[in-house]
Amino acid sequence: MSDEKKDVNSQQENEGKKGINKKLIIAFAGMGAVIVGLVIALILVATSGKKDVDSSASKAESSSAVASETDDTSEEDSVADESEDESDADEEESSQESKDDKKEKGFIISYSGDNSWQDGDKVMTGMEIGIENNSDEALKEWTLELEIDQLKSCDGWNGNFKVKGNKLTVTNVDYNGEIAKGGSTSIGCNIGTGTKLNVKSAKLNGVECTVKKGKVSQNNNNNNNNQNNDKKVTEKDVKKLLKRTSKAKQGDDWLHTDGSKILDKDGKEVWLTGVNWFGYNTGTNTFDGLWNSELVSSVEAIADHGFNLIRVPMSAELINQWSEGEYPKANYNNAYNEELNSMNSLEIFDYFLKLAEENGLKVMPDIHSAETNASGHTVNLWYTDKVTVKDYYHALEWLADRYKDNDTIVAFDLKNEPHGKPNEGDAAAIWNDSKDANNWKYVAETAASKVLAKNPNVLIMVEGIEIYPKNIKKNGDYSSTNSDDYYFNWWGGNLRGVKDYPIDLGKYQDKLVYSPHDYGPTVYQQPWFEGDYTYKSLMKDCWKDNWFYIQEQDIAPLLIGEWGGFMTEPNLTWMTYMRKLIKDNHVNHTFWCFNANSGDTGGLVKDDFVTWDEEKYDFVKEVLWQEGGKFVGLDHAIPLGDNGITLKKAKGL
């Protein structure tokens, strides 16, 4: 580049520099105004946004008096607004607390009716009632009065029930008479009304109650003695408590069948003479009665009195909760059952199995209901909207798999009392050769196969249904809604279908036992109780064609899963005839029931769940398996209680 050129460029550059400086001043001035404007705008946003902008950040943005003043105002406004918000929240909380206090005061009666069926002019409903005491003091005794639309009849449990017009009066029994402050208890019934169940009003001890339809508060009153917050709970070694006795020999007590007989491993004919003890189906989540009694002594007493099998009603819902690691609280008296305080509800069941084994007892779980509910047994089928068929199968599979190496459990009752009437269509249990969802025969075979796949050693109990077509060829699909086209029997007691469609367990056929239920006139006045019925008339009108033919024709063994009732007429005559049938034919059975709180039958123990009803026990004792004045157990190594012998020492039937 030449020097001339350089000089010219230098002059232009200097002139250019002077021009740029002026422009920059103007530009900077303009930019400054913009920045000030933006800062002011931001401050205004901060002021309007109050708490949303950090005031310290605003101060760092500008040192102007306006910015500082605005930031200070923003802080003050934020504090004021926070105070207002807290005040509003306090008012809302106070209002909510006040609302809750108002809601919780006094007595609350909740009720639900999950299942209904038609019985002549009556709508029958399985009803559960919760009584919640949110008054200022405990109740020592109570009388509940319910006004119910078109009330016609009521048979209940956990209380004394009386119907007069549209008023249902329930008084407490000994074991649930006290309801602590903040506590609750539940009762149940099969109630008949002329319309859909509707409770119009309620009074408890003469005081008006809040009535709620829907979810019933589960019993937390029987556990009043559990709430010993002032007492130190002594932790127990659960692993040690659950350890099975060294006296037991595993795997030598499995049973099988041959024709109408049940045999042990050596071919010795045995007699299952047991008892029912419910609670794992009701929401107690353990055995009912442990609010007044001890588990250890109760199990011992059952064994000492000569029952060799305990049928345990359970809900599929509870079993599935256990399978998922959920353990609903077991309700019992922890002062009487201190060793249970360190256990969850599943561990308590495991502990019961250990106690049963120690006393020479065997156990038969029974899926009594799909859902955990004191009225769950009134539901027709083995599934509900809440508990699916898949859930039902899963419960059986899980239980069978968990205890496959424990021959304390020797049998499974697949489902308690499938039932339903002709006008209930798909909601009624049927028995045919279809794969319909409500076909109990198909479902029972499917369920049995799942159980036996987990444990091929257990016996399978299959109950009957309620109705069966008089003409199976014309009405095999149960399409007729005319009651005259069907034979009726007790829920679970109709096994007429076995003639046409016997249960097929394939290679496990020697594990099948049919299990009807049968009751007397105090439970329901069936047609065969009309007039002066006799043993002969009962056999002709009910027993033979519904189920006794199965044993008589050597098709399979029978086990009457439920029979029993009050020791008064008109029930006593029927009980005497039923006992004769059992005794003369060595029919296997589990008596209903141990529980005092069975409203329509009573129990073998009185309300304290400790004192035995000696009159009833002496009656049943005649059909307990005995040899030489000793009760015979089903365990080869451990004798049955203090008054029994082992199966190894027994001669057999």
Image (cartoon, rainbow, N blue to C red):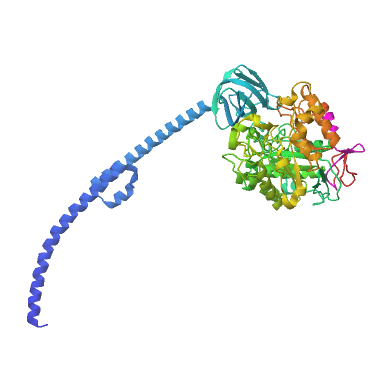
Residue 58, position as x, y percentages in the image: 30, 49
The front one of 494 and 433 is: 433
Stretch of the chain drawn in magenta: 616-637
360 w.r.t. 2: above or below: above
Residue 316 falls in image quadrant: top right
Residue 82, position as x, y percentages in the image: 37, 38
The front one of 544 and 413 is: 544
Residue 130, position as x, y percentages in the image: 60, 28
Residue at (65%, 23%) from the top-left corner? 154
Residue 431, position as x, y percentages in the image: 66, 40
Residue 596 falls in image quadrant: top right
The front one of 561 and 340 is: 561
> Is 134 contained in the magenta span?
no
Residue at (78%, 37%) from the top-left corner? 549
Q: How many marks?
A: 0
Residue 641 falls in image quadrant: top right
Residue 566 as seen in the image, left or right of residue 229: right
> Is 624 contained in the magenta span?
yes
For the question of whether residue 613 can be seen, the reply is no
Give the position of the N terminus as an image quadrant.
bottom left
The front one of 342 and 616 is: 616
Residue occupying the far front of the picture: 474
Give the position of the C terminus as an image quadrant.
top right
Residue occupying the far bottom of the picture: 2
Residue 636 as seen in the image, left or right of residue 106: right
For the question of whether residue 159 can be seen, the reply is yes
Residue at (84%, 31%) from the top-left corner? 580
